[in-house]
Image: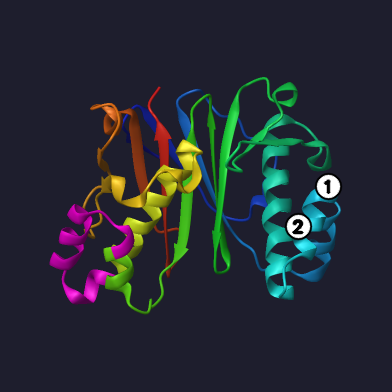
């Protein structure tokens, strides 16, 4: 557990489904949970039973069985986790969705104002949970990317591209994913999807440097100071970031 900005960052590791008891979260805490999406068939069948018809329909639309199974595990574990916070059976949870598709708990089921965000990549998932404040999380499997610098030139800001080019070549791939996860987490926290251009704000990306939102253009001058950012490496081969609005 560590301090970052005005919140207490608590990193929860291990199987979400293996937790015991109901977790409690104070107003200033940010809980981050990580888990694997590969699961035995019996567990997948159990998790599948917690999903409502609309989520089962989404699962069926995946072309590959692997992706279908991972979706079921991610949504099922999310329901288990949120249900444990709210003392509700996972199948009874109801979500609402913003115009850009960000899910939220139905207000009638959420007396403490829990907010959450889910991300997954490869075999890992990440969930961030807060009370009464916007949160966004992103996790990515670190892997070779074709034309990495070309992608950065298209989507990163000029300042970020300068920083990325200055990173030693053997650290550049990691720096790319640091940048990507931090930018995605900020956009997801805003809940406005890709209506926010990726090159309209700057984040840190140099390995070993503190994760921060440096600047946001075309908005209020103090916008960057309104948000707190943290970065994690939950397991070998993955990096993750979380962004929360200041209280």
Mark 1 or mark 2: whose residue is earlier in sequence: 1
Quarter of the rendering containing residue 215: top left
The magenta stretch spans residue 111: no
**Residue 51 appears anywhere in the view:** no
CA–CA distance between discs 1 and 2? 10 Å
Which is more toward the observer, 161 or 11?
161
The residue singled out by tag 2 in the image is 58
- Which residue does the image show at 34% across and 27% down from the upper left? 6
Helix, strand or loop at disc 2? helix
* Image marks 1 and 2: residues in contact by CB distance under 8 Å: no
User: Horizontally, is 77 left or right of 222 in the view?
Assistant: right
Figure quadrant of the N terminus: top left
| Main secondary-structure element of the magenta-colored stretch | helix
Which is more toward the observer, 224 or 229?
224
Picture layout, residue 105 above or below residue 41: above
User: Number of marks in the image?
Assistant: 2
The location of residue 237, given as percent across then percent down, is: 42, 70
Mark 1 crowd level (few <14, some 14–19, many ≥20, 10 Å Cα):
some
Picture layout, residue 86 above or below residue 159: above
**Magenta-tinted stretch:** 154-173
Helix, strand or loop at disc 1? loop
The location of residue 94, given as percent across then percent down, is: 76, 36
The location of residue 113, given as percent across then percent down, is: 60, 23
The location of residue 194, given as percent across then percent down, is: 46, 48
The residue singled out by tag 1 in the image is 52
Quarter of the rendering containing residue 88: top right
């Amino acid at each position: 557990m560590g301090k970052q900005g005005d919140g207490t960052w608590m990193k929860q590791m291990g199987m979400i489904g293996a937790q015991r008891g109901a977790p409690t979260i104070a107003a200033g805490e940010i809980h981050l949970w990580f888990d694997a999406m590969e699961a035995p068939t019996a567990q997948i069948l159990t998790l599948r039973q917690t999903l409502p018809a609309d989520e089962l329909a989404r699962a069926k639309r995946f072309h590959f069985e692997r992706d279908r199974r991972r979706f079921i595990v991610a949504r099922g574990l999310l329901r288990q986790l949120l249900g444990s916070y709210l003392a509700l059976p996972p199948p009874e949870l109801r979500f609402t969705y913003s115009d850009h598709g960000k899910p939220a708990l139905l207000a009638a089921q959420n007396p403490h104002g829990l907010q959450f965000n889910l991300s997954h990549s490869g075999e890992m998932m990440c969930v961030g949970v807060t009370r009464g404040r916007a949160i966004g999380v992103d996790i990515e499997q670190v892997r070779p990317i074709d034309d990495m610098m070309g992608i950065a030139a298209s989507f990163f800001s000029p300042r970020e591209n300068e920083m990325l080019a200055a990173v030693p070549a053997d650290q550049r791939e990691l720096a790319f994913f640091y940048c990507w996860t931090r930018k995605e987490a900020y956009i997801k926290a805003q809940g406005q999807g890709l209506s926010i251009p990726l090159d309209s704000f700057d984040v840190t990306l140099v390995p070993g440097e503190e994760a921060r939102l440096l600047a946001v253009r075309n908005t209020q001058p103090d916008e960057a100071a309104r948000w707190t950012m943290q970065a994690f490496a939950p397991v070998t081969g993955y990096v993750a970031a979380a962004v929360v609005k200041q209280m």
